[in-house]
Image (tube, helix red, strand yellow):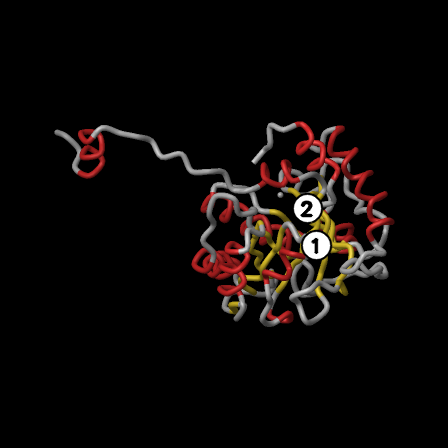
Amino acid sequence: MIFTVLLSASQKLLTLSFLLFATLPGAPNGGDKEGADKKSDKSTSTKNSEAIIRGVDVSRWQKEIDWSLVKDANVSFAFVKATQGDFRLDPYFARNWEETKRMGITRGAYHYFKPEDPIEGQIEIFKSTVTLEPGDLPPVLDVEVSDSRISPQELRQSIRTWLEAITKYYGVKPIIYTSQNYYRRWLQGYFPEYHFWIARYSDVQPETHHTDSWKFWQFTDSGSISGINSAVDMNFFAGDLDLLSQLCMPELVIAQESPLKQMKHIQPLP
């Protein structure tokens, strides 16, 4: 998932906006913790660029969600847990995946990485579970646990293997989710070609290596949103709605071919 001057300005805006926004419902403060259509109208474009783009990420812990109420709470995007390790499916994924689309909330799916599980199995379970469509956010690899039996080099190699296989399958580079502390210890500077989504429970924005960039900031794990009957992770996007749309899966372009060419694909001419 390298920032330009525009993105830098957006991040500064986010930091200032956070201080104002933190007093609103759904944006409580938290302590720093390791863990876990473009519009042609000028006024609309200006409004988009000034808006705070916030979202949630959910899993089985939030149970059944009323996504219509979440939409009414000005939630623009949602990341939904799909899979974990090499065998576990989130029991609420199918419902959350369909409901976010039905409500018009920009959706993304994530896989919870388990370093001790075979990486090929972790690749296959995500591919077999998640079907991406135009307008969906890129896949996310949730990296927040380590294993003392696995070296840092092996850890990073498994992460890269998953990222490259998923890029090849979906045609888009995934985003890496991690905490600020985990990033500093294991990941900084090793994945410059991927965007980061960083959990930092503070009013200080995420800090990254000069070769890296972050797109999403999870600023609390104890948010409150109508439609979700438990605490929920809440996030800011480092940009406006137009930039969020540009990050999503593009519309598929289907080539129009003559009947002869279509038949050629089925049965090559001698």
Residue 13: horizontal and vertical position, in percent?
A: 81, 39
Which mark is drawn over residue 260? none
* Residue at the far left in the pictured view: 270
Q: Residues within 10 Å of mark 2 (few under 14, many from 20)?
A: many
At label 2, which amino acid type do we have?
Phe
Q: Is residue 31 left or right of residue 178?
A: right
Which quadrant of the structure image shows residue 57? bottom right
Q: Which label's residue is closer to the chain start, 2 or 1?
A: 1
Relative to 137, is 47 above or below?
A: above
Residue 149: horizontal and vertical position, in percent?
A: 66, 65
User: CB of mark 2 within 8 Å of CB of mark 1?
Assistant: yes
Relative to 73, is 175 above or below?
A: above
Q: Residue at x 60, y 63 (%)?
A: 114
Q: Nearer the viewer, residue 181 or 105?
A: 105
At label 1, which amino acid type do we have?
Thr
Q: Residue at x 69, y 37 (%)?
A: 48
Q: CA distance from mark 2 to mark 1?
A: 8 Å
Which mark is drawn over residue 196? 2
Q: Is residue 178 left or right of residue 140?
A: right
Q: Which residue is mark 1?
A: 178
Tag 1's secondary structure? strand
Which quadrant of the structure image shows residue 265? top left
Relative to 148, is 175 above or below?
A: above
Relative to 244, is 26 above or below?
A: below
Is the N terminus in the top left, top right, bottom left or bottom right quadrant?
top right
Q: Residues within 10 Å of mark 1 (few under 14, many from 20)?
A: many
Residue 103: horizontal and vertical position, in percent?
A: 55, 55
Q: Residue at x 49, y 59 (%)?
A: 98
Tag 2's secondary structure? strand
Q: Residue at x 86, y 61 (%)?
A: 31
